[in-house]
Amino acid sequence: MIKNLEQLLEKVKVKEKRTLSVAVAQDKEVLKAVSDACSLGIVDAILVGDEAKIKSIIHDENLNFENVKIIDEKNINKAAAKAVELVSSGKAHFIMKGLLNTADLLKAVLNKEYGLRGNSLLSHVMLYSVNSYHKVLFLTDGGMVPYPNISEKVEIINNAVLVANKLGIEKPKVAPLCAVETVNPSMQATIDASMLSQMNKRGQIKNCVIDGPLALDNAVSKEAADHKGIISDVAGDSDILLVPNIEAGNLLGKSLTYFAMAESAGIVVGAKCPIILVSRADTAKSKLYSIALGALVI
């Protein structure tokens, strides 16, 4: 089990090297991260996009890309399609978003003819290393499913559990987050949390331990849970925080980044391969961690 994201890099280094396809690769921070990943021996890369702009960034930033393959495609939609096709044809193992809108990349990923559509719901899984917490923390889903219903929450949990398993967490503890820690018929999130807990106890959601509803303080602080008289195997020791909707996930994730100075990695799972779907505001280091997480999950 890893306890910080530097250990994530060490863990992925001993795995077989994977090939990363980068869609519309003419983005400075993306190319910095991919260059670092190549230098560390984590991936080989195929860069799809405007070749002249890609080479200009590589030269200006003095990036290390020995024998990198560049496919020249100036049209954004065609570049996205080509990057996806590289994965579906087996020439690459996973894909990363470059200088294009998320919707344009996902359109290519979900294309029925050559895309990477799987049988699962696509959901976003973030991984955080927070100095004040005793282990790495997963957050889902703050990036893909706006207002998940109970069935979608089951799939979101299953996706996050698979990622946690790849990091050596055999039976992750899942906290369905709510504003309160008791079931309130007027608060749908608390009803869903109670149902998810019961489904887990009956074996309908496997390979994890779910207990909720839990408020955030109870999920991450044993002292807070004890103070409120909450007896739980998850409280104060959560691995996965399941948020009720995309706004909650977005706000909590950015709070961890900007207030707690947490380091992070993020991927989209549920397709035939991990998708490195990073924000333009993410640092090159965060993008590197995301590449490492994707390579580890394959």
Image (tube, rainbow, N blue to C red):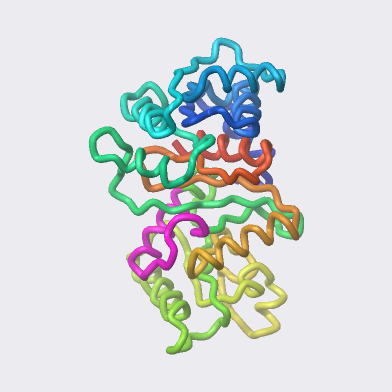
| Image mark count | 0
Looking at the image, residue 134 sits to the left or right of residue 175; the answer is right
Query: Is residue 38 found inside the magenta-colored segment of the image?
Result: no
Q: Position of residue 283 (x, y in %)?
A: 68, 41
Residue extending farthest to the top is 67
Q: Nearer the viewer, residue 27 or 14?
A: 27
Query: Is residue 152 found inside the magenta-colored segment of the image?
Result: yes
Snapshot quadrant of residue 39: top right
Residue extending farthest to the left is 113
Q: Residue at x 28, y 48 (%)?
A: 119
Q: Position of residue 99 (x, y in %)?
A: 53, 36
Q: Is residue 93 visible?
A: no
Quadrant where the image shows the C terminus:
top left
Q: Position of residue 138 (x, y in %)?
A: 57, 55
* Vertical comparison of 45 with 207: above or below: above
Q: Residue at x 48, y 85 (%)?
A: 183
Q: Position of residue 50 (x, y in %)?
A: 50, 23
Q: Nearer the viewer, residue 24 or 225?
A: 24
* Vertical comparison of 171 with 188: above or below: above
* Vertical comparison of 142 with 281: above or below: below
Q: Residue at x 33, y 66 (%)?
A: 151
Q: Residue at x 24, y 40 (%)?
A: 112
Q: Is residue 31 visible?
A: yes
Q: Which range is magenta? A: 140-162
Q: Nearer the viewer, residue 68 or 120?
A: 68
